[in-house]
Amino acid sequence: MDVDSHTDDQIRKILSLKTVAVVGMSKNEEKAAHYVPKYLLSQGYDVIPVNPTADQILDKKCHASLDDIQEQIDIVDVFRPSDQVLPVIEEAIKKKPKVIWLQEGIHNEEAENLARNAGIQVVYNRCMLAEHQRLF
């Protein structure tokens, strides 16, 4: 699976955005959907967990969906299987984030094109933690 065509400078600029809603954030410390947002928190990001099965993760209030989030979101970071991304993107577009970031192993061209057509940048098949460590 390939990755998007963003340059390192573009990824650095995206990573300078600080409010990140994490769709599919996990309570399980072993999963990337837990330790990646935990790392982002440690780097000063405002992480907003989105998981309908949890009340709190990492001492942060969990939201059942993106629709439940009141504040402005810069990045929607998605930890869902590629075939489950489309409804997440459709919901995300309503929140008007600057970026939708599909984590490593996640790629859904139809959903990505929908987001791009709405004026939202899309990063796919990349890990925010790995990219942050690589570039900073």
Image (spheres, helix red, strand yellow):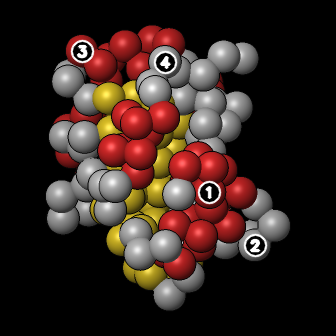
Earlier in the chain: of badge 1 and badge 3, it is 3
Q: Position of residue 130 (x, y in %)?
A: 65, 50
Q: CA distance from mark 2 to mark 4?
A: 31 Å
Single out the mark in the foreground, 1 or 3.
1
- Labelled disc at residue 133: 1
> In the rendered structure, which amino acid carries the disc numbered 2?
Glu
> Where does label 4 land, which residue?
5
Earlier in the chain: of badge 1 and badge 2, it is 2
Mark 2 surroundings within 10 Å by alpha-carbon count, few (fewer than 14), some (14 through 19), many (20 or more): few
> In the rendered structure, which amino acid carries the disc numbered 1?
Gln
Earlier in the chain: of badge 2 and badge 3, it is 2
Q: CA distance from mark 4 to mark 3?
A: 16 Å
Single out the mark in the foreground, 1 or 2.
1
> Where does label 2 land, which residue?
29
Mark 3 surroundings within 10 Å by alpha-carbon count, few (fewer than 14), some (14 through 19), many (20 or more): few
> In the rendered structure, which amino acid carries the disc numbered 3?
Asn
> Where does label 3 land, which residue?
117
Q: Could you tell me which residue is drawn at 19 percent across and 40 percent down?
A: 96
Q: CA distance from mark 1 to mark 2?
A: 19 Å
Front residue (pair 32, 55): 32
> At numbered mark 3, what does the secondary structure look like: helix, strand or loop?
helix
Q: Quadrant of the N terminus?
A: top right
Q: Position of residue 101 (x, y in %)?
A: 46, 39
